[in-house]
Image (cartoon, grey):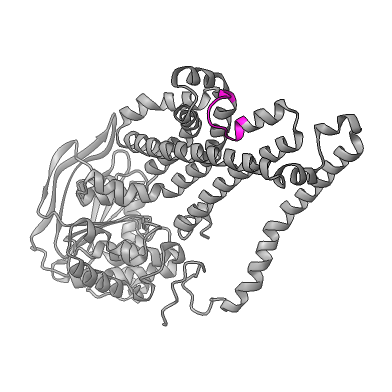
Amino acid sequence: MTALEPTPAAPVLPDPGADAPPSAARPSRLRHLAAVLVPPLLVLAVVVVAWYVVSLVVLDEREAFLLPPPHELWTDAFADPEIRADILDALWVTTQTALIGLAISVAIGLVLAVAMARAKWVERSLYPYAVFLQCVPILAIVPLIGFWFGYEMFARVLVCVIISLFPLIINPLQGLLGADRGLHDLFTLSHASTWTRLVKLQLPAALPDIFVGLQIAAGLSVVGATVGDLFFGRGAIGLGLLIQRYSSRLQSAELLATVLVACLLGLVVFWFFGALGRQVVGRWSTAWGAS
Amino acid sequence: MPATTATTVDETKAPYLLDFRGVGRRFGGTEALAPCDLTVRRGEMVSLIGPSGCGKSTLLRLSSRLDQPSSGEIDFRTDSVGYVFQDATLMPWRSVRRNVALLAELAGTSRAATTEAVDAALATVGLTDFADHLPRQLSGGMKMRASLARSLVLRPEVFLFDEPFGALDEITRGRLNLVLMDLFLEHRFAGLFVTHSVEEAVFLSTRVLVMSARPGRIVEEIEVPFAFPRSLDLRYTPAFAELAGRVAKALEAAS
C-alpha cells in the first residue's frame, strides 16, 4: 500500500485509488466560486435597480433629497476629497474603538469562560449576569455611561465591551464543557493536572465555538462602537457622530455613504474572523467546513 | 468444573493483578452492582456479558479507579491500566500519530521513547501508512485501531475494553478480534472485555462471566478451553458452538 498524500484540503477516505486527479479541482473550484458569488450579486443588482426606480421615478423633485440615486453616493460623497477624508477619519476612529473593545471582550470572555468551566459555583454565580448583560437595552444605558465615564475612548470602548461580551463568554464556555467524556476519562487515568487538561483537551476542543463567538462579537463590536459614538454626540468623530451630523444637515448622499461604510466595516470584521476560523480549525472541525 | 487448567495462555496460578472482594456500587438508591468477588490474573482475558444496565461498565470503571466502590474493596496490584471505550474518542484536531502519542505525552515519556513506541504501536495495528491522517479521514474500524494503539503505547498490565467493537460491521469486528488476540498473546496483559456478542466473548476469552441486571451480579462463570492462537474458523466448530450455546442460555436466563 502506498502512503496517501496527507493533503488536509482533500477529505481523503482511506481507499487508495479513490483520489480525484488534482487537475479536476480547478474548474470545480471556479464553479463553486460562481455559485457563491452570483446569487448575492443578483440580489444586489435588484436592490440597486429598485433604488434607482424609487429615487428617480417614485419620488418627485421636492422629495428627491430623501433618497438620492446610488451614483450620487459616489459623486457627492466618496469622490469629494473633503467628505472622503471625513469618512475615512471617522472610519479609523470607529475601527479603533471596535477592535480595542473586541480585544478586551475576548480577554474577559475567555477568562470568565475558563473560570465558569472550572468551577460550577462560578458558573452559577455569573451566568445570570451574563444573561443580564445580553438583555441590557444598550441605548438606555449609553447616556448613563457617558454621564459616569465621559465621552472619550474609554466610554465608547465600554459600550463596545458590554454589547460584544456575551457571545464571547457563552460560546467558549459551551466548547470548554463539550470536550469528549472519554477523553476526560483518559486524562483522569493519566493523573493529568487541571492545567494540562485545559491546554491539551478543553481549549482545543473549544476552538470551533470560540471562533463562532468571535465572529458574532466582531459584528456586535462595530455596532457598539457606532452606537456609543452616535449617542455621546461629543468627542472624536467616529462613524456614528458623522451619521448624526449628515442627518441633521439633510446631506442624504453623504449620510447614505457613511452608513454604507459602517455596514462594510461590520462585514469586513465578520468575514475576517470567519476566514481566520476556517484557517485555524477548518481542517478538522465539521462546523467550520471539514467534511 | 471440567478440566480446563492446561489450556489457558498462562498458568492459572499467575499472580493476580486485580482482586475484587465483595465489591458493590450503588448510585443513590439504586444498586448498580451487587457485591461481587472477581480475581483477574496476568495472561487472562475475561469477558463480561450481560443485558444492558447490568453494571458491566460500572465494573470496568471500578477496575480503572475512575469510580470508587460503595462497599467491599479492590486490591490493585498494578497502576498500569489501559482503557478502550466504545467510541474511538480520538482528538479530531490531532493526527493519528499525535493521538496515539497522547497517553505517553501525559505520562511524561521522553520524546524519543514516545516516537519509538508510537511507531511500534502503529505498525502493530496496521496504521503506519495513515499516521499523518486526521481521524475524520479514517473509517470506523481504523479509528478503533488508532484507539487501540493509543492504549498500547504504555504497555498496560491491565487492559479494559468497554464494547470497543460494538459499532463495527461483522467483517471489521472479526479482523479487530484477531488484532486484539495478537496483542494479548504478545503482551500477556490481564484483559477485561465487555461485549454484547456471545460469539466475540467466547472467541476472545479464557473465561466468560455472565451478568444479570438490576442489581448487576455475576451469575455464571464459564471457562473457555480453546488453545491460543485461535483462528476465526474456530467459530464454526461444534465445540465452539456448544460453548457459545451455554453462554447464550446463561445470558437468556439472566436477562
Residue sticking out furthest to the front: A82
Tell me what residue is drawn at x 44 percent, y 29 percent.
A154
User: Residue B227 versus residue B16: which sits nearer the camera?
Assistant: B16
Give the side of residue B24 with respect to residue A10, left or right. left
Q: In this view, does A77 lie above or below A166?
A: below
Q: Is residue A144 above or below residue B105?
A: above
Question: Which residues lie in the magenta part?
Answer: A231-241
User: Residue B82 versus residue B206: which sits nearer the camera?
Assistant: B82
Classify the position of the N terminus of chain A by image quarter.
bottom left
Tell me what residue is drawn at x 17 percent, y 66 percent.
B4
Indicate the position of residue A207 as horizontal and vertical percent values. Answer: 42, 49
Q: Can residue B240 be seen in this view?
A: yes
Q: Can residue B57 be seen in this view?
A: no
Tell me what residue is drawn at x 48 percent, y 78 percent.
A16
* Among the 4 quarters of the image, the one containing residue B151: bottom left
Indicate the position of residue A96 as horizontal and vertical percent values. Answer: 49, 40
* Label total for image: 0
Give the side of residue B4 with respect to residue B146, left or right. left
User: Residue A25 versus residue B21: which sits nearer the camera?
Assistant: A25
User: Residue A282 versus residue A237: which sits nearer the camera?
Assistant: A237
* Residue A92 sits inside the magenta stretch: no
Give the side of residue A271 with respect to residue A127, left or right. right
Tell me what residue is drawn at x 21 percent, y 52 percent.
A190
* Among the 4 quarters of the image, the one containing residue A63: top right
Indicate the position of residue A19 as horizontal and vertical percent values. Answer: 53, 76
Indicate the position of residue A119 as horizontal and vertical percent values. Answer: 30, 33
